[in-house]
Image (tube, rainbow, N blue to C red):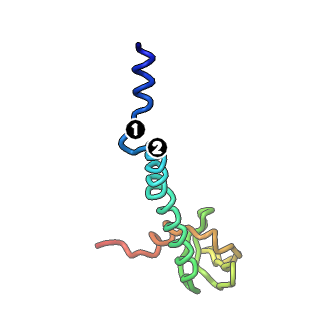
Amino acid sequence: MIATILLQAAGASSIFGTYGNFVPLVLIVVVFYFFMIRPQVKKQKDQKNYVNELKKGDKVVLTSGAHGRIAEVGDTTFLVEHESGHKTRYEKSSVSLDASKALNTPPKA
């Protein structure tokens, strides 16, 4: 008798029909997109725009922690002049967006 009840329950249709098992999976994908993928893409876009807008004389902080001022801008590189006076060439991708913005932002009064 229990087997008959279980078989009848398995044949009953759910609210979502035959696609009811996929609803949680779709919701997980949507959550991952809005909380992980979309913010990362936005951050990469901001980084690219910031690096492309840098010009000679701007202060930068590199991902290695080095501080300096841009002495020359190339296609894919910067020539950075350090406080000691020596110049070093770095890739544009090595500029830290957050640290450079904090360095160039005047302190609040």
Q: How many marks?
A: 2
The percent coordinates of residue 92 (x first, y second) are 64, 74
Q: Which amino acid does label 1 sit on?
A: Ser
Q: Split into 4 quadrants, where in the image is the C terminus?
A: bottom left
Q: Split into 4 quadrants, where in the image is the N terminus?
A: top left
At a point 46% along the width and 46% down the height, the residue shown is 19
Q: Residue 9 vs residue 59: left or right?
A: left
Q: Residue 3 carries which label?
A: none
Which is more toward the observer, 74 or 35?
35
Graded by Cα atoms within 10 Å as few (under 14), some (14 to 19) or many (20 or more), the crowding at tag 1 reads: few
Choose the circle earlier in sequence order: 2 or 1. 1
Element carrying mark 1: loop
Question: Which picture quadrant has residue 105?
Answer: bottom left
Q: Mark 2 points at which residue?
A: 18
Q: Mark 1 points at which residue?
A: 13
At a point 44% along the width and 55% down the height, the residue shown is 35
Q: Residue 100 vs residue 73: left or right?
A: left
